[in-house]
Amino acid sequence: MNKLNLFMKASRFRVIPVMIIPVILGAMGAYAWEGIFHPFLFVITLVGAGAAHLFSNMINDLWDFRNGVDVAAKETASTISTNSGYLANGIVTERIFAALTWMLLGIALICGIILSFYTGWGVLIFGGIGALIAYFYVAPPLKFGYRGKGYSEVAILVSFGILPVMGTYFVQTLQFDYRALMLSLPIGLLTTLILFNHHFLHWQSDKESGKLTLVVVWGERRALQISKFLLILAYLSLLVCVIIGVMPIYVLLALVTFLPVYKVYKQLQDKNPSQAYLPLLGASLKAAIRCGLLMSISLLIQGIFQ
Ligand SMILES: CC(C)=CCC/C(C)=C/CC/C(C)=C/CC/C(C)=C/CC/C(C)=C/CC/C(C)=C/CC/C(C)=C/CC/C(C)=C/COP(=O)(O)OP(=O)(O)O
């Protein structure tokens, strides 16, 4: 495997759309509501937020390895491991992995500093909160992603919804706006659903290594009910956005992206083998990407024609 492929897998690059889309949404909100779009600031925000996301993925692997979670996932037969496995399998040394991880935070920080020249240092507060959430999600003493109290779900809603949508909107307009907060909810909740559903794949090894996710604490049946509830909540928040005028009526077309996920739920029983959850994870990822893109396109159309 060449170095680029190695890096892409180590940083879980394939899930980068869950950060790109909220950044696009924040920018499209600024364009639709205020007629403002700064391409240079947009590109720097995109690179900075993307690097922060990849940093969060790699710091997660690094501490999961140090905490013994990745090794347990590798050794538990009934489990599908979702980390790169490079550290657990000794393919990359911990030192190189850590250097790459901190380099990504460095890139995010440089982008934040560039943006702060144009927008003021407030932008670093958004980035700083995100960086702290990413680090203490897995790192001691907090390790709040391992506590099974729903902190990780709130962290994902904030990190992949509220912070990037409101942060990008702030970079473009220098304003805080409740509309950007509302806009962040459907996409933030759909990304929370992805994280929630991916815990079904390896809850047995999480349990063994003491990593308490909500699936471990509640069991599959109850966790599946919460998963469905999260899906409904995401699309309800989209509806609310239309009702209060944050998004145009034609964004309701995005409601169809609900259907493939709904179909997968119908195929699941109260308890399922790990493999059975792969289609659920795939369908949730597709729903977030498709719904987020349709929301962005709707705001773009609104901006062009008003
Ligand atoms: C020191 C300092 C100020 C640093 C700032 C650096 C920084 C981040 C700068 C950004 C500057 C920019 C671009 C500002 C512009 C305005 C914007 C867009 C602001 C938003 C910033 C931003 C992107 C914040 C979000 C940061 C992120 C991505 C946080 C992630 C948090 C989080 C909980 C991640 C978990 C990810 C993973 C892998 C979960 C799954 O793991 P796990 O549950 O263990 O399961 P598994 O078994 O699969 O490992």
Image: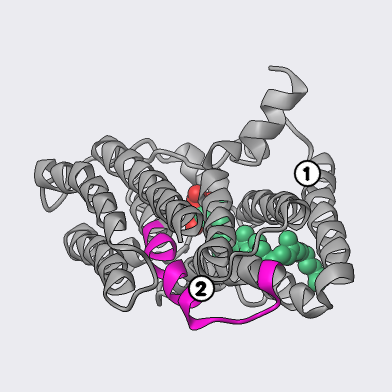
Tell me where residue 305 sits by quadrant. bottom left
Q: Any atom of ligand 1 within 8 Å of the CB at mark 1?
A: no
Q: Is residue 80 magenta?
A: no
Q: Position of residue 257 (x, y in %)?
A: 26, 46
Q: Position of residue 66 (x, y in %)?
A: 67, 54
Q: Tell me the residue at 43%/47% (across/down).
A: 293
Where the N terminus falls, by quadrant? top right
> Which residue, as the protein is rendered here, is positioned at the far front?
306
Rendered image: mark on residue 29 = none
> Which residue, as the protein is rendered here, is positioned at the far top?
1
Amino acid residing under circle 2 = Ala
Q: Tell me the residue at 54%/81% (across/down).
A: 177
Please tell me which residue lies in front, 208 or 58: 58
Q: Which residue is mark 1?
A: 94
Secondary structure under badge 1?
A: helix
150 on left or right of 8 = left
Q: Tell me the residue at 81%/44% (across/down).
A: 100
Q: Position of residue 306 (x, y in %)?
A: 46, 61
The correct choice, above or below, for 109 with respect to 78 in the image is below
Q: Earlier in the sequence, mark 2 or mark 1?
A: 1
Q: Is residue 187 magenta?
A: yes
Task: Tell me how far mark 2 sits from mark 1, CA to CA.
Answer: 39 Å
Q: Which residues are magenta?
A: 172-190
70 on left or right of 172 = left
Q: Position of residue 147 (x, y in %)?
A: 47, 73
Q: Which residue is mark 2?
A: 180
